[in-house]
Amino acid sequence: MATLEEQLNGALRDAVRERFGTQAVADQELFVQPATSEKFGDLQCNVAMPLARRLGRAPREVAAGLLEGIRWPKCVERVEIAGPGFINIFLSEKWLAGYCARLLQDERCLVPEVGAGRVVVMDYSSPNVAKPMHIGHIRSTVIGSALDRMYRYLGYRVIADNHIGDWGTQFGILILGYRHFVDQEALRRSPVEELERVYAASYAKARTDREWMEQARRELVKLQRADPENLALWSRFVQLSLQEFERIYRRLGVRFDLVRGESYYRDRLSGIVAMLKERGLARESEGAQVVFLEEEGLPPCIVQKRDGGFNYATTDLATIESRIQEFSPQKILYVTDERQQLHFRQIFAIARRVGWNTELVHVWFGLMRLPEGTFSTREGNVIRLELLLDEAERRALEIVRQTSPSMPEDQQEEVARAVGIGAVKYADLSQNPQSTVVFTWDKALSLEGNSAPYLQYTCARIQSVLDKYRETIGPLPSAESLELTHPQERRVAVRLVRFADVVLRSASRYRPNLLADYLSDLAKEYNTFYQNVPFLKSEPGVRESRINLCRATAAVLRRGLTLLGIETPRRI
Ligand code: ARG
């Protein structure tokens, strides 16, 4: 079934075609948007402006012409032309109420399964072996996992692949360093930290000591030739790192379908270069094999180094080829920080030249600044995520002790876990991914503002209204009884009917913050409703209707938070 926006866009599109021809405007020019203020209706459409410009006529006149005889779906009560030619759309109250009642009875909150039969590979998190996750990996994990949940919910077959950095020249240096410098006790205590230290020491030595460098190279060659001893060391490094990453994923509630490191593709690398050469895409330049990308306005991309070694770019090309062969995805999504934009532009350009026609998307995000102190190392980049999460849970526990003093202690702790982790995730997800974010505890854990605890609290409040209804009045009413009798109810309803469109848009633009913004706006309107309109004390009939509106709101808030990977405890 078409969503609200699809229905309205469809009616407008047909009208434009009939009156002004198929080419008159681009699709995105006629799309309806939520009205900026209630005065302007529930939704508005600004198509008359670009259309009038193109036709050399007055926008109001064009708008009037467009609306003449337009076949609106039955959700539309009336429309008006305002100002210079805005089309303001008012939804029918009866339809709004009916939609909310249907939403309440639908498992999926009326979100269509638009992705059925389609496959998306999602490449996110992807930290590197023997190095701690840096803030970029954390953001990639949180944002990637939210997109993963949304796409799955929309019916796509999602293959979440953690593309671990587990292959490359650094392993020669690491193996050599390990043989000379490792402190087994430290390795037991904090494996990744120790491996990182060993690597750094060995790397530093290699920079001044040619003999050491030469030895490291030999260790690498041995590893590449599958020397059993080096292979065993390498695989131990990978295991130790994965165990540590896994602990973080468990806390964050993140699961992958595949954890295929770069090493998985190592046997394909020479084939990729051979193929690029054969097709005339790669050629020799100063001893290296290079793909020149002048046409795309990009710098050349090296796919095989002068010493014969392959690199990050070669691996990513091999990965695309393998994913296409195995999964035939419509789309492959990569979630990384902004520093990899050029890399992916080059890879995507080469993929297009090869003729791989899977849609390739790089979802990049900016930096996030974290609170000073224990969470960031000197470089300010590597964060001790586990400490950040511990702190979040500790602070959340203080809040829960205030909001639910009578709750048993173990339950308080369980709730604090959901609230603390939720707060950290939401602080990340609620921002435009591409802007710089400053994380503050006050904002993340606020019970009032745009935060996870606020949304979780709203859900818990609704739950307690429903509990109260059951206690004092009886079983919850039949879902059909839903009428809107108060303007504030209408405001809530107008938001509920947008849910499907918001999920679709949030997914298709790769912006979880659109969903987060929507949820916080819905919660705000709901709370105004809750504070100003009597529920349980209103007259029978109205009361049931209001209870059902609450239930529909709770269903949408819960579903929305689940899509963002945030839990909603029954009580807070
Ligand atoms: N391991 C890389 C890094 O830490 C990220 C990998 C992203 N995915 C990919 N297919 N290149 O920078």
Image (spheres, helix red, strand yellow):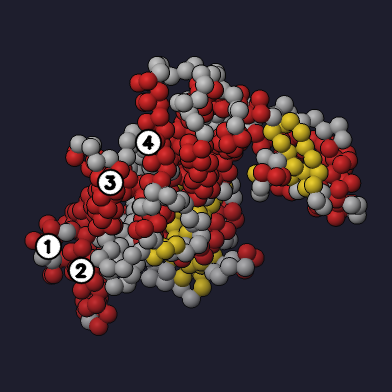
**Residue contact at pointers 3 and 4, CB within 8 angstroms:** no
> Which structural element holds mark 3?
helix
Residue 381 percent across, percent down from the top left = 34, 67
Q: Residue at x 19, y 68 (%)?
A: 198
Front-most of 256 and 395? 395
Q: Which residue is tagged 2? A: 197
Q: Which residue is tagged 3? A: 402
Q: Residue at x 66, y 29 (%)?
A: 93
Q: Earlier in the sequence, mark 3 or mark 4?
A: 3
Q: Which residue is tagged 4? A: 460
Q: Residue at x 23, y 37 (%)?
A: 406
Residue 498 left/right relative to 32: left
Front-most of 520 and 8? 520
**Residue contact at pointers 2 and 1, CB within 8 angstroms:** yes
* Label 3 – label 1 distance at C-alpha: 40 Å
Ligand 1 contact, mark 3 (Cβ < 8 Å)? no
Residue 499 percent across, percent down from the top left = 55, 37
User: Looking at numbered disc 4 in the image, what kind of residue is underneath it?
Assistant: Ala
Q: Within 10 Å of the Cα at label 1, are there few (<14), some (14-19), or many (20+) other Cα atoms? A: few
Q: Quadrant of the C terminus?
A: top left
Q: Which residue is tagged 1? A: 186
> Which structural element holds mark 1?
helix
Residue 42 left/right relative to 396: right
* Label 2 – label 1 distance at C-alpha: 10 Å
